[in-house]
Image: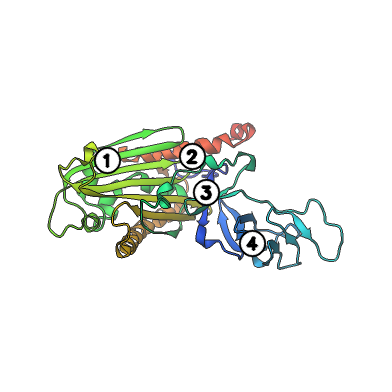
């Protein structure tokens, strides 16, 4: 049993996906991340600048202004800020106040995403960006989207770490009774958690029959490896192979394999940016398959969206209610423990003592 409410549910000292790489252009793009308003743009050299979206002078959002070369011009009084957040111009005076600057956030482009560090910039080590190399690996093909969700980001992680819900929420697409009936194993590390499930000699759900290209009824062995990496990356190694062809022993050659990569960035305590992409290592040049797989997955996420947003509403209406955990929640529980440990590590001891 656990509380469904804490003062802050996300760590700041972590890399979050701020945007797909193609979203950020030579124009001011605002986005709220971890409750903080950020404005992003590309400089003339193509690098990404990410600044606090509030002018030093009167707090008007800088995203309401425009770019002058690589500098952001405040649309209220014309103050200019360079890509590092330093003010370079003030109207009607020659001397610039040395304190006139806005916060600059570290940004790294990797795996087709722009990753942003919302905490102490001295701790922003790009080597700690979660591994999502399948997203831009040429040995894999597939597309994804950004889906805005009206719920706390941890609810999305909970959802992905417990795929038992496929038997019920997605019973007409990727789920059937075999998912809920199959045993599973939960393991964890310092910053990771994994849930493993095999379903042997089962009927494939419609989504997987489509991926396999089955035109007649077949039996399959199905696998799910759910891999969480803090603070909010979840990569699914999922697939099916013809039953009895050796998939549990490592031979997946008679089947199909997907890597479904997710990153859930908190917007606020009640809203999230849900980045996802479905990648496959077969039929790499089949654009029709790419498009249909993306659209089918978007429909599946739409089913999750309805449940998760209703869950958030219920939590808001019952702020003192508790969550009760079942065996199926093991992976989600470890993900939350890791997230809470990260928050605790960046909370001063005096504040922890007062809690």
Comes first in the chain, label 3 or label 1: 3
Task: Judge depth for marks 1 and 2 and give the one in front.
Answer: 1
In the rendered image, the quadrant that contains the C terminus is top right
Question: How far apart are labels 3 and 1 at the CA level?
Answer: 28 Å
Residue identifier under label 3: 16
Neighbours of disc 4 within 10 Å: few (<14), some (14-19), many (20+): few
Question: In the picture, residue 41 is in which quadrant?
Answer: bottom right
Can you name the residue that lies furthest to the right here?
94
Mark 4 or mark 1: which comes first in sequence? 4
Residue appearing at x 63%, y 43% in the figure: 121
In the rendered image, the vertical position of residue 78 relative to residue 12, given as above or below: below
Q: Which mark is residue 44?
A: 4
Q: CA distance from mark 2 to mark 4?
A: 37 Å
Of mark 2 and mark 4, the one earlier in the sequence is 4
User: Of label 2 and label 3, which has the lower sequence position?
Assistant: 3
Verify CB contact (< 8 Å) between mark 2 and mark 4. no
Q: Secondary structure at mark 3?
A: strand
Percent coordinates x, y for residue 169 in the rendering = 29, 54
Secondary structure state at the residue bearing disc 2: helix
Q: Which mark is residue 197?
A: 1
Q: Nearer the viewer, mark 3 or mark 4?
A: 4
Q: Is residue 159 above or below residue 87?
A: above
For the residues marked 1 and 2, what is the alpha-carbon distance in whole angstroms? 24 Å
């Amino acid at each position: 049993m656990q509380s469904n409410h804490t003062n802050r549910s996300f760590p700041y000292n972590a890399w979050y996906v701020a945007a797909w790489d193609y979203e950020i252009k030579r124009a001011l793009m605002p986005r709220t991340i971890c409750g903080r308003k950020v404005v992003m743009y590309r400089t003339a050299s193509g690098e990404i600048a990410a600044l606090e979206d509030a002018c030093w002078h009167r707090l008007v959002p800088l995203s309401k202004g425009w770019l002058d070369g690589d500098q952001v011009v405040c649309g209220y009084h014309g103050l200019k800020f360079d890509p590092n957040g330093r003010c370079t111009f003030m109207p009607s005076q020659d001397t610039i106040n040395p304190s006139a600057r806005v916060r600059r956030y570290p940004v790294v482009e990797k795996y087709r995403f722009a990753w942003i560090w919302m905490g102490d910039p001295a701790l922003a080590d790009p080597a700690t960006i979660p591994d999502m190399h399948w997203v831009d690996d040429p040995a894999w093909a597939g597309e994804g989207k950004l889906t805005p969700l009206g719920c706390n980001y941890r609810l999305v992680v909970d959802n992905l770490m417990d795929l038992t819900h496929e038997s019920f929420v997605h019973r007409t697409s990727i789920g059937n009774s075999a998912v809920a009936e199959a045993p599973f194993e939960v393991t964890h590390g310092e910053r990771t958690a994994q849930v493993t499930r095999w379903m042997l000699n089962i009927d494939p759900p419609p989504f997987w029959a489509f991926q396999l290209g089955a035109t007649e009824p077949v039996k399959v062995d199905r696998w799910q490896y759910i891999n969480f990496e803090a603070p909010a990356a979840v990569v699914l190694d999922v697939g099916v192979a013809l039953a009895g062809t050796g998939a549990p022993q490592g031979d997946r050659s008679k089947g199909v394999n997907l890597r479904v990569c997710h990153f859930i960035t908190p917007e606020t305590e009640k809203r999230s940016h849900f980045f996802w992409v479905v990648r496959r290592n077969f039929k790499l040049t089949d654009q029709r398959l790419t498009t249909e797989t993306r659209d089918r997955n978007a429909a599946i996420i739409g089913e999750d969206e309805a449940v998760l947003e209703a869950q958030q509403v219920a939590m808001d209406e019952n702020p003192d209610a508790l969550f009760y955990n079942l065996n199926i929640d093991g992976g989600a529980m470890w993900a939350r423990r890791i997230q809470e440990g990260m928050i605790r590590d960046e909370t001063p001891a005096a504040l922890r003592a007062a809690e």
